[in-house]
Amino acid sequence: MSGNVELLNDTLAGAKAEGRSALIAYLPAGFPTVDGGIAAVKAVFEGGADVVEVGLPHSDPVLDGPVIQTADDIALRGGVRIADVMRTVREAYEATGKPVLVMTYWNPIDRYGVERFTAELAEAGGAGCILPDLPVQESALWREHAGKHGLATVFVVAPSSRDARLAEITAAGSGFVYAASLMGVTGTRESVGDQAQDLVRRTRATTDLPVCVGLGVSDAAQAREVAGFADGVIVGSAFVKLMLDAPDGAAGLDAVRALAADLAKGVRGTG
């Protein structure tokens, strides 16, 4: 089975045709349990997310703030494995027919085997992978296998990326470009800031790929702001925090579904 990069491309193009940004949600696999994580992904899709990134929990998540680190720790202590990440992708995709990516650091893929990982992700119906710490110049093996299996390779750019570096990164990527809105780790913030808008402008000058902004968006007003200049709005920590704070699993699912609905209005300019 080939992966779903075309589904991802069509979803992002469809949002653009509607004159809006896409809403991309992030949730870690295995949190609060494997079944609970699958239910959460389905809930954010039900609320209005266009795309979901499923995080592969890692013991040293250098780019993630305390909220996602806490969730990753819960998932790892629960014994989450790569097989559980693949199951999360499969069940979410089969239930919704919408694009599901995996976001992961490179080390777990390297240990697992690139060919094995890409083959299994494609077989599960995955649309691709976001690889925040894989340098483009070291990505040839990954891109070869991802391309063979119909998977997108999404790289991350940051405000510190110089224009020549942006061009190098975007030329190697597919699906979309993940623009980190500011320097630092993931987490909700009071404002997303001008850095993000400038980064999107500079990135767009190098590529026709959609440019989606993550790190810091937590409510409909911020989603609306980012949707004014980006092709996609990526929200992670705000969803995870709601689940961490919920008194029980059902309340957590209700909360993330409601936030997704609120953010969906934001990216449409109606929230």
Image (cartoon, rainbow, N blue to C red):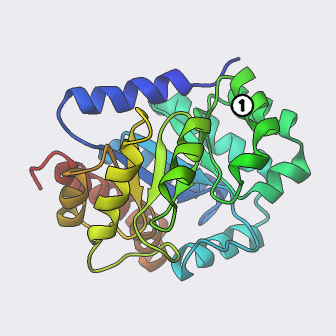
What residue occupies the far top of the structure in this picture? 1
Query: Is residue 7 found left or right of 45 in the rendered image?
Result: right
User: Considering the image in quadrants, where does the C terminus appear?
Assistant: bottom left
Q: Residues within 10 Å of mark 1 (few under 14, many from 20)?
A: many
In x, y percent, where is residue 204? 37, 43
Residue lying at 40% horizontally and 23% vertically, measured from the top left: 10
Of 51 and 153, nearer the camera is 153
Of 217 and 143, nearer the camera is 143
The residue under label 1 is 146
Residue lying at 34% horizontally and 63% vertically, measured from the top left: 196
Of 164 and 65, nearer the camera is 164
**Residue 97 appears anywhere in the view:** no
User: Considering the image in quadrants, where does the N terminus appear?
Assistant: top right
Does 31 appear above or below 94? below
What residue occupies the far front of the structure in this picture? 164
Does 3 appear above or below 86? above
